[in-house]
């Protein structure tokens, strides 16, 4: 909540009827070999291994390459979303 970037993650909702199956899927997707294959086949970064050629070189905070287009507007819209305001009124 509040990160201004694409951050992908797996989650199990509180109303899930297949918690064990969802847990197995997440655990499978987090296996090092599966992550490695996704990186090789799709070019997707993973959180388990540093990129080849950068092992030990990645340090410091996240650096954003572009500023948010309109931080105040984004903040107002986000407040409307979390307040439950209807999307058709946006």
Image: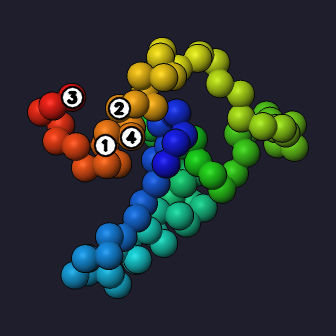
Looking at the image, the residue that sits furthest to the left is 88
3D distance between C-alphas at marks 2 and 4 = 5 Å
- Verify CB contact (< 8 Å) between mark 2 and mark 3: yes
Mark 1 residue crowding within 10 angstroms, few (<14) / some (14–19) / many (20+) = few
3D distance between C-alphas at marks 2 and 1 = 6 Å
Q: Residue at x 53, y 64 (%)?
A: 30
3D distance between C-alphas at marks 4 and 3 = 11 Å
Mark 4 residue crowding within 10 angstroms, few (<14) / some (14–19) / many (20+) = few
Mark 3 residue crowding within 10 angstroms, few (<14) / some (14–19) / many (20+) = few
Vertical placement of residue 20 versus 36, above or below: below
Task: Report the residue marked by disc 1.
Answer: 81
x then y, percent, for residue 71: 51, 22
x then y, percent, for residue 16: 26, 76
3D distance between C-alphas at marks 4 and 1 = 5 Å
In terms of depth relative to the viewer, which is nearer, 49 or 17?
17
- Verify CB contact (< 8 Å) between mark 3 and mark 1: no
Q: Residue at x 12, y 33 (%)?
A: 88
Instruction: Decide if residue 25 is on the left or right side of residue 39.
Output: left
In terms of depth relative to the viewer, which is nearer, 53 or 11?
11
Q: Residue at x 87, y 43 (%)?
A: 56
Instruction: Decide if residue 73 is on the left or right side of residue 43.
Output: left
- Verify CB contact (< 8 Å) between mark 4 and mark 1: yes
Whether residue 44 can be seen here: no
Task: Report the residue marked by disc 2.
Answer: 77
Task: Report the residue marked by disc 4.
Answer: 79
Please identify the quarter of the rendering in which residue 33 is found.
Answer: bottom right
Mark 4 or 3, nearer chain start: 4
Instruction: Decide if residue 62 is on the left or right side of residue 43.
Output: right
């Amino acid at each position: 909540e509040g990160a201004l970037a694409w951050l992908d993650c797996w989650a199990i909702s509180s109303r899930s009827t297949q918690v064990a199956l969802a847990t197995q899927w997440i655990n499978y997707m987090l296996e090092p070999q599966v992550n490695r294959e996704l990186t090789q086949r799709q070019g997707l970064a993973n959180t388990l291994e540093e990129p080849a050629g950068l092992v030990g070189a990645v340090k410091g905070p996240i650096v954003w390459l572009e500023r948010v287009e309109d931080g105040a507007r984004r903040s107002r819209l986000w407040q409307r979303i979390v307040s439950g305001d209807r999307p058709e009124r946006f």
